[in-house]
Image (spheres, grey):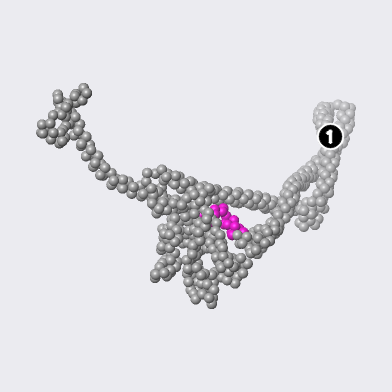
Amino acid sequence: MTNRWVMNRVGLLNFWYYTEETFELAEGRMLLRGTNGSGKSLTMQSLFPVLFDGDTSAYRLDSFGSRDRKMEDYLLGEKGVSQRDEGIGYLFLEVKREVREEYLTVGIGMHANRGGKLTKWFFAIENNQRVGKDFELYEELHRDELTPLTKAKLKNRIAGKGRIFETQREYKQFVNQRIFGFDHLDQFDELITLLLQLRSPKLSKDFRPSVIYGILRNSLPKMKEDELLTLSKTIEKLDLHRERLEDLTREMKELNSFAKNYHNWHDELVSQIAGKWYQLFNDMKQLEKQVAELKQQLENHNIDLLKNRKNFERNEQEVEALTATISQLSQHEGMNLVHQGLELNKRLTQTSEDLAYTKEQLVKKQQIVKEQQMELENRKYLQEELYNDLEELIQDNQQYLSYLRFEELDSSYSEKLRTTITTFERKYWLEQVRQKQSHFRKILQMLSKLVHLENQKVDLERLVGNVQQELDELQRDLRHWQQTRLDELEKWKLAIDAWLTRSPFQLSKNQYHDLLYCIDSLLETEEREEVVLSPLTDSYQETLKKEQLELVPLESRLEENQTKIEYIQLEIEEWKEQKAPKPYQNEGRKIIERAGVRLPSMFYFMKE
């Protein structure tokens, strides 16, 4: 900002041994001269930096940091020397723009009772009025007796011209915003601390770099114990959180790897055990059934074979008997024998056919028995292989039994897998496996949920960081636009000053001050343009009214002159219409003509 504020005046009213005193500054600078003990340091310590931030702590009122004197002592005077035990006093600071007659006054009002509590209030005059010129902090109830305004009276007097601050922080924020313009109040506090350090006594006698370094180092804001404690705890928590996060991350990776491998292994193991066992169980049942059927068929075939053999032997005996009978009959004659022979021959033929059929069936049965025996041997061989595979599978899965804890279900679990498993045991084991599978699924879900929560935590932390970054950017933009707004208002003021130099009308001093006050009010409030420019509009209206009043006689004279012009133009027209117009004669010429004096004509003089 090119047109900055500079200190123009500082003043004291009813303070220490000053009844009313104002110090003028030249371009923000002031030189105090006086003998030792005349009050130079006391005056400066009472004014600066008290008027900057409103802090009246005792240690800040002494360049040595002593707490012996309080602000009450400075306000009322030394005890035993001053007769005042109660009083009201004021300190004020007036600042001015470098290139414009624009003023701003800030100050502190105080009320104290000796031995009692100090009461403070703060004020600012923003409408360009100046203390001691067109605004007073006292009232003169009696001649030559100044009575400082109370807080209530000051509030009533300053209404519409400035503001009253109830707290020191509000006052400090206003001074920083309107005069110094630091982005953060902490920076303003650091400036105050630096000023306190630089006013250390006898600085010029020990102006070494190390001393300056110490002063600048001591001017840095000291962190409070609770802030350090909070910071240390935060750092410790961050370290613990970081270590815990690393442990959790490592454990999470291991658990994820274990869960993945365990899930795959578990599914594979359960699938292998259940599928293999079920397959073996079904195969064994099927083989037992087939063996039983083959045994039954073999027994049936053996029985049929014995029956066929007996029938065959019996048939052979009958054939032999019939052959003998035929032989005997062939030796005798007779129809009975012939018929008997034919019958026997028929029976022999039938018996031969039965014998051939029986032999054929016997061969087939023997072939079937042979095939069944081969199949039985194959089944036994396959059963032995399945049992061997089962044994190998049990041996391979011994290392996982501690995880499945099947021994808790049945101490003879491994032995039963090698021999015989009942249907109840199979159902019980499968149910336990399903429960364990459900348990591990829940664990995996919880692990997945934990990972999800960790991801959410990271996302939320990232979101908080982004929001904080956006907030910082918005605050930075806000400060930038506030500064831009202040700069624009300053440009507006400069433009108004330049315009007023060319303006056909001028603002009065009060109107100019009111205009600047209205423009400054735009820093905190939104006002319509016509409200802000109302002092300018009022001045224009006043000037316009004045010009209009001055215009009335001018218009009257203009009308009279216009009438005369019309009359003269009418005479000119009449002259033009006359053939020999008679010129105008004044009273002197008329007197000469009445006296009979003959005057030469114009042509006479032309001839000469």
The spot of residue 308 in percent (x, y) is 83, 37
Using the image as rendered, state which of residue 590 and residue 97 is in the foreground. Answer: 590
**Does the magenta segment cover residue 187?**
yes
Residue bearing the label numbered 1: 367
SS of the residue under disc 1: helix
Query: Please, is residue 357 above or below residue 546 in the view?
Result: above
Location of residue 380 by image quarter: top right
Residue for point 51% across, 75% down: 82
Residue for point 88% across, 32% down: 320
Location of residue 80 by image quarter: bottom right
Residue for point 24% across, 41% down: 557
**Does the magenta segment cover residue 34?**
no
Using the image as rendered, state which of residue 540 and residue 368 is in the foreground. Answer: 540
Please identify the quadrant where the C terminus is shown: top left
Residue 232 in view of the camera: no
Residue 79 in the figure: left or right of residue 308 = left
Assign the magenta stretch its main secondary structure. Answer: helix
Residue lying furthest top:
607
Residue 491 in view of the camera: yes
Using the image as rendered, state which of residue 348 and residue 378 is in the foreground. Answer: 378
Residue range corresponding to the magenta coloring: 176-194
Query: Please, is residue 497 above or below residue 588 in the view?
Result: below
The spot of residue 434 in percent (x, y) is 70, 51
